[in-house]
Amino acid sequence: MLGRGKVSADTRRLYSQDKELAARLPELLDRARTAERDARDGDVDLVEERRRGQELDTALTEAMRAAYAAERVAVGPRGYEDRIYRRRHLAKPDVKELTQTAERLLTVREAHRLHGIARVPRQMAGQGAE
């Protein structure tokens, strides 16, 4: 079994980037919750509602990316290069939980993109930018 367990320098670099992003997951989830509360807060004009919707989209996207990074970190650096190793580790309960979190965030983000970001007519968009 020559070379088993060794990973390339590029993989180690990607893994360390994912570790940094995964460490920010709780902070990014809190930011998404705050953005959701702000987006649901009523009595604002259409331009402000759109801005808040876009902020929520950004927060959900960042949290989702961090959740997928946490999944990759839980699998380990070999999972970047060895698909069998990755599949075997994706079946573990702790990794499955991270996968479910990431997929739930993806679903919420996509639903928000379809129905949650207000459309603003061009005339109003120009007025709000002044």
Image (cartoon, grey):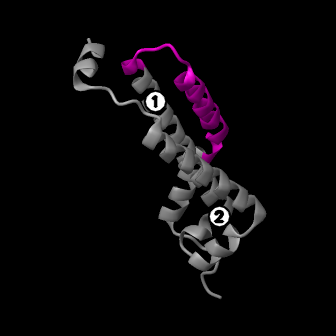
Among the 4 quarters of the image, the one containing residue 129: top left
Residue located 62% across and 31% down the image = 33
* Quarter in which the N terminus is drawn: bottom right
Residue 77, x across and y down, in percent = 61, 65
> Label 2 sits on what residue type?
Gly
In the displayed structure, does residue 55 sit left or right of residue 79?
A: left
**Of circles 2 and 1, which is in front?**
1
Tell me the distance, in whole angstroms, between the alpha carbons under discs 2 and 1: 35 Å
Residue 35, x across and y down, in percent = 55, 27
Placement of 108 over or under 35, stated as above or below: below
Q: Which mark is residue 79?
A: none
- Secondary structure at badge 2 equals loop
- Secondary structure at badge 1 equals helix
> Label 1 sits on what residue type?
Gly
**Residue occupied by mark 1:** 53
Circle 2/circle 1 CB separation < 8 Å: no
- What is the total number of numbered labels drawn onto the structure image? 2
Residue 25: in magenta span: yes
Q: Residues within 10 Å of mark 2 (few under 14, many from 20)?
A: some
Residue 97: in magenta span: no
**Residue occupied by mark 2:** 76
Residue 110, x across and y down, in percent = 48, 47
Residue located 68% across and 59% down the image = 74
Residue extending farthest bottom = 1
Residue located 67% across and 68% down the image = 90
Please provide the residue range marked out in magenta.
22-48
Residue located 63% across and 80% down the image = 4
Residue extending farthest right = 93
Whichever of labels 2 and 1 marks the residue nearer the N terminus, that label is 1
Among the 4 quarters of the image, the one containing residue 68: bottom right
